[in-house]
Image: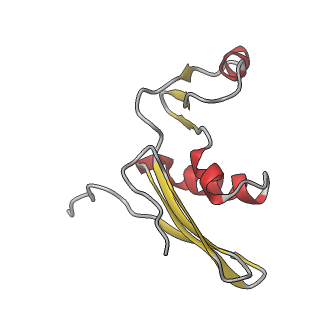
Amino acid sequence: GGKRPMHTIIPAMLAENGRVTMPFGVMGGGYQPAGHARLVSNMVDFGMDVQAAIDAPRAFADPTGLKLERGHAPGVAQALADLGHEVIVPREPLGGAQAIRIHDSGVLEGGSDARKDGCALGY
């Protein structure tokens, strides 16, 4: 038997119209696949820029309940509880993310999660 990895790394690339438009990654164990989907959805479905998509409050369902970060609109936690969810507001953030958006013009737009210790720099 082999050992389980201490952590997982799940890098991703968003492709639109046949070209890569954003390499990105999300940290956070079991949250990673949901975090990837949420980041892309925030940008594609809700029109957020890279940093806003990363900064948006997160939610994640696991066997202990529905984890809901602080920052959601007032009443969201109660509405979810009223639907029968066991809502948990975690002390620690749900994951972290970094991304580089490649615009059609060639401009690179970086985003980094304030929940972690990274930063986006350019020159």
The percent position of residue 116, horizontal first and vertical second, equals: 40, 48
- Tell me the quarter of the picture where residue 2 sits: bottom left
Residue shown at 54% from the left, 69% from the top: 12
Q: Tell me: residue 75, above or below residue 119.
A: above
Residue shown at 21% from the left, 60% from the top: 3
The percent position of residue 15, horizontal first and vertical second, equals: 68, 76
The percent position of residue 121, horizontal first and vertical second, equals: 46, 66
Q: Tell me: residue 22, above or below residue 56.
A: below
- Tell me the quarter of the picture where residue 77 sits: top right
The percent position of residue 18, horizontal first and vertical second, equals: 74, 85
What colour scheme governs how the chains and residues are painted in the rendered image of this protein?
secondary structure
Residue closest to the far front: 123
Residue shown at 69% from the left, 22% from the top: 80
43 or 8, which is in the foreground? 43
- Tell me the quarter of the picture where residue 91 sits: top left
User: Quick one: quadrant of the N terminus?
Assistant: bottom left
Instruction: Please state if 94 lies on the left or on the right of 13 as rendered.
Output: left
Instruction: Please state if 58 lies on the left or on the right of 42 as rendered.
Output: left
Residue shown at 71% from the left, 26% from the top: 73
17 or 121, which is in the foreground? 121
Q: Tell me: residue 55, above or below residue 122.
A: above
84 or 68, which is in the foreground? 68
Q: How many marks?
A: 0
Instruction: Please state if 41 lies on the left or on the right of 26 as rendered.
Output: right
Instruction: Please state if 83 lies on the left or on the right of 1 as rendered.
Output: right
